[in-house]
Amino acid sequence: MSQPITLKDHEKDARLVRRRVLVGIVFVLLLIGVLIARMYYLQVVQYEHHSTLSENNRVHVQPIPPNRGLIFDRTGKIIADNRPSFSLTVTRERAGDWRQVLDGVVEVLELSAEERELFEKRVLQGRRPFEPVPIMYELSEEQIARIAVNQFRLPGVEVAAQLVRHYPQGAHFAHSVGYVGRINEAELKKVDPVNYSGTHHIGKTGIEKFYEDQLHGQVGYEEVETNARGRVLRVLKRTDPIPGKDLTLTLDLDLQEAAEEALAGRRGAIVALQPATGEVLAMVSQPSFNPNLFVTGISFKDYGELRDSIDRPLFNRVLRGLYPPGSTIKPMMAVAGLDAGVITPKTKVFDPGYFQLPNVKHKYRNWNRGGDGSVDLELAIARSNDTYFYDMAHKLGVDRMHDYMTRFGIGQRVSLDMFEEAAGLMPSREWKRARYRQAWYPGETVILGIGQGYMQATPLQLAQATALMATRGKWIRPHLARRIEGELPVDPEPLPDIELQDSRYWDYAVNGMEQVMHGRRGTARKVGDTSLYRIAGKSGTAQVVAIRQGERYDSEALAERHRDHALFVAFAPVENPQIAVAVMVENGESGSGVAAPVAKQVMDAWLLDENGQLKAEYAPVQVAGEQQP
């Protein structure tokens, strides 16, 4: 029997559909209500918060680094300037996966893995948010073009034009002016992070470091509007930076070149001072190096060659080189002996070629093994007689020698603005006891009288001691800055002048120095005979290796780098001192034969005109039949 046919209940289906539609409408209305509530919460309740976030995403404050101050020599020739350079920068906040972006840069520019590693180190260096970090400098036109073509692959990467430090004189002033380099983490902690926003370089050595605060300037700012990709659309507000102050140095480029030419490629140092002002006219340490290599980051290969060179081009011999001053210190010792009363200008010592302490067999040899016979003070300086100064040192004693030589600047930093200067060493009883836990021996006092033993001085200190002889003890610290935006440098801690019991003691010692150059028995008379002006000088040698008792110095038996250093100090003209010079030629052996001609060449370059005549302002004036300065 067939089943009955059930008819479809359309009314029931209609009610079901209506219920489902109603539920859907209610659900949609609930969702719309939630959406409206959320919109109300975001746009009304949290309006201030989100408008601030939006504004921060749209408007950014970017630092504007100041232009670094320029550096000139005393005649206005540029020594350090700023030149435009295109660099590649990365902003981490806009780069997304910045390591992948760096990989893209390396691929586009076809760079090495070492450069890729260097890029990452630079990006990781501490910086303010949204501050572009330079990862590569001095881009070529081809590199700029490659970056532009592949810009879509490199978010956060931009080519930026900026001013980079440049030293047009190359190696001439590398040891005095120094150089700038990239700021490292340690330096970032010491400087004002706000003022150095956007600045990527800082003074590393020399004048660039000492006067960093004046040369750097004051940072500026600009508020910019950017799009979603971080591109600047427009500048809303700008505060201009204050550029660094220009610095005029006491150095003279022409004299610097003349001094380097006088050294003729030999290892050594030259310092030329103006005695009356303390201005450093020339400061040469050879060999030197090109400071431009350090500005944007020196390569490992180039730095390795400089660091490992046997000639040590990175070593500043003028300020860091410590050498026994040798006989160059004898005029200052003479002043000490006169003032202490242990000798007079007429005191004579018989020189058989050596000196012996009482009841001691050891002989302290004079450089002239045959001896000079009866010697007074003037002849002792002119002949550089060791025996005379052995005897005087024994009478003077180490304590008084230490006191007087310290007043001449030996064993202390003498400069005003050369922070790298070593202090040198003027030994004393207390120093030896603290250093070696030993007593001071009389023999050590004897050799101290001729500038040997523990005594060590820099070429700058020898130049300053010579300038003090020229000015009769007037202390003015040597300095490199002549003007800073028109302002003169000020010595915050001036040293006291050297006051003697009788001012004539200076003349006695200076007369001896003059006889070195112009006397019949002077050790450097061959150099003095060619001079158009009167020079007061003193030669010296600094031992590199010790010579045993009884042995003679044999140049041929020694390796070239074990031979004595040649030293010479001088000032001129004697009647009106305009320049004081200290010369050190490493392994030059003869102070009067090697170093003295170098000093004479430097003084000629300063004192003579283009016709080879003494400049009129330095010539003595004839008054009533007498010559006066």
Image (spheres, rainbow, N blue to C red):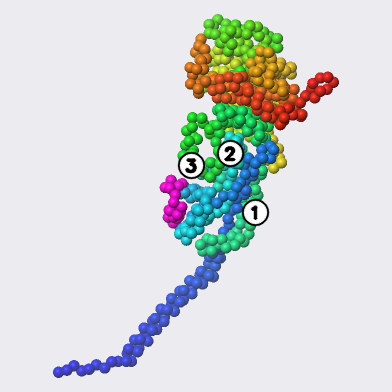
Quarter of the picture holding the C terminus: top right
| Residue type of the residue flagged with mark 2 | Gly
Classify mark 1: helix, strand or loop: loop
Task: From this view, report whether residue 197 is shown above or below residue 268.
Answer: below
Q: Is residue 303 located in the magenta-colored stretch of the structure? A: no
The image quadrant that residue 262 belongs to is top right
Q: How many marks?
A: 3
Name the residue located 38 percent from the left edge and 81 percent from the top edge: 23
| Residue type of the residue flagged with mark 3 | Ser
Classify mark 3: helix, strand or loop: loop
- Residue 27 image point, x, y percent: 41, 78
Distance, label 2 to label 3, CA atoms, is 18 Å
Q: Is residue 114 located in the magenta-colored stretch of the structure? A: yes
Q: 184 or 326, which lies in front?
A: 326
Name the residue located 57 percent from the left edge and 15 percent from the top edge: 447
- For the residues carrying marks 1 and 3, which lies nearer the camera in this image? 3
Outermost residue on the front side: it is 611
- Residue 272 image point, x, y percent: 65, 29
Q: Are marks 1 and 3 in contact (CB under 8 Å)?
A: no
Earlier along the polypeptide chain: callout 1 or callout 3? 1
Residue at image mark 2:
170
| Magenta range | 97-118
Task: From this view, report whether residue 39 is shown above or below residue 350.
Answer: below
Residue 240 circle label:
1
| Residue type of the residue flagged with mark 1 | Asp
- For the residues carrying marks 2 and 1, which lies nearer the camera in this image? 2
Q: 475 or 387, which lies in front?
A: 387
